[in-house]
């Protein structure tokens, strides 16, 4: 088992399939950071993951609301988009401390905007443009992150 995976030259459909393959392992909860430039696929990945987890309602981007929350079975899910955050101190009023629960899944887009206030991710994903396709780097952090990555590998996510 590795602590990192890299997926090269993936299109939007492949990106969605990767998110769907991660969903069964993500049901156990954890923190997943989604970093990358504008348009790299962070929201596309998050939306596909949430839908694969069983979110039946429309999955909106939390760009303006900053956080969208869902409940699927006994799993609480929080999807944050920190793009509009200018200073990590602004996160204090969001009550993020209440989100960190072992049985909760937290997806955070633009996590670098919350540096110093966010706990480390279990799984850090970095998306980047690769011509008309994308590149996805996944790095595990800690036991839970390695379990997520291993489950992803076992689900056939290797390119």
Image (spheres, helix red, strand yellow):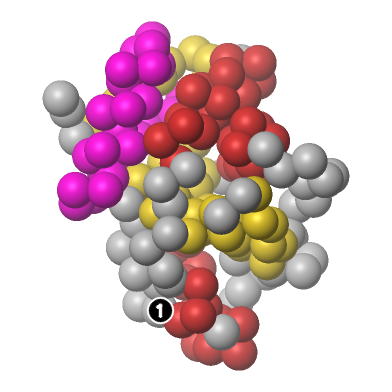
Q: Residue at x 35, y 77 (%)?
A: 116
Taking 37 as reference, is 68 above or below it?
A: below
Quarter of the picture holding the C terminus: top left
Quarter of the picture holding the N terminus: top left
Query: Most extreme residue toward the left, as rendered?
Result: 1
Q: Is residue 65 toward the left or the right of residue 114 in the image?
A: right
Taking 76 as reference, is 4 above or below it?
A: above
Taking 16 as reference, is 117 above or below it?
A: below
Query: Most extreme residue toward the right, as rendered?
Result: 58
Q: Which residues are magenta?
A: 134-159
Q: Write down the quadrant of residue 84 in the picture.
A: bottom right
* Front one among 35 and 102: 102
* Front one among 34 and 94: 94
Look at mark 1 in the image and give the residue it sits on.
117
Query: Most extreme residue toward the front, as rendered?
Result: 73
| Residue 96 seen in render | yes
Whole-percent x, y for residue 154 in the image: 31, 17
Q: Residue at x 35, y 46 (%)?
A: 123
Q: Residues within 10 Å of mark 1 (few under 14, many from 20)?
A: some
Q: Residue at x 43, y 52 (%)?
A: 29
| Residue 35 seen in render | no
Q: Is residue 147 toward the left or the right of residue 59 in the image?
A: left
Q: Is residue 153 magenta?
A: yes
SS label for mark 1: loop
Q: Write down the quadrant of residue 8 in the picture.
A: top left
Whole-percent x, y for residue 57 in the image: 83, 45
Taking 16 as reference, is 107 above or below it?
A: below
Q: How many marks on residues?
A: 1
Q: Is residue 67 toward the left or the right of residue 22 in the image?
A: right
Whole-percent x, y for residue 71 in the image: 66, 56
Q: Is residue 141 magenta?
A: yes
Q: Write down the quadrant of residue 80 in the picture.
A: bottom right
């Amino acid at each position: 088992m590795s602590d990192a995976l890299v997926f090269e030259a993936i299109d939007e459909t492949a990106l969605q399939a990767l998110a769907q393959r991660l969903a069964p392992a993500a049901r156990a909860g954890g923190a997943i950071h989604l970093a990358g430039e504008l348009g790299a696929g962070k929201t596309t990945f998050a939306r596909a993951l949430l839908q694969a987890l069983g979110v039946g309602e429309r999955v909106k981007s939390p760009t303006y609301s900053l956080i969208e929350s869902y409940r699927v079975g006994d799993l609480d899910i929080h999807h944050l988009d920190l793009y509009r955050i200018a200073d990590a101190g602004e996160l204090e009023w969001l009550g993020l401390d209440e989100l960190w629960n072992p049985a909760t899944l937290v997806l955070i887009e633009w996590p670098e905007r919350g540096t110093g206030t966010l706990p480390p991710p279990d799984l850090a994903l970095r998306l980047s443009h690769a011509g008309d396709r994308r590149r996805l780097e996944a790095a595990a952090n800690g036991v839970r992150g390695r379990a997520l990555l291993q489950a992803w590998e076992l689900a056939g996510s290797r390119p």
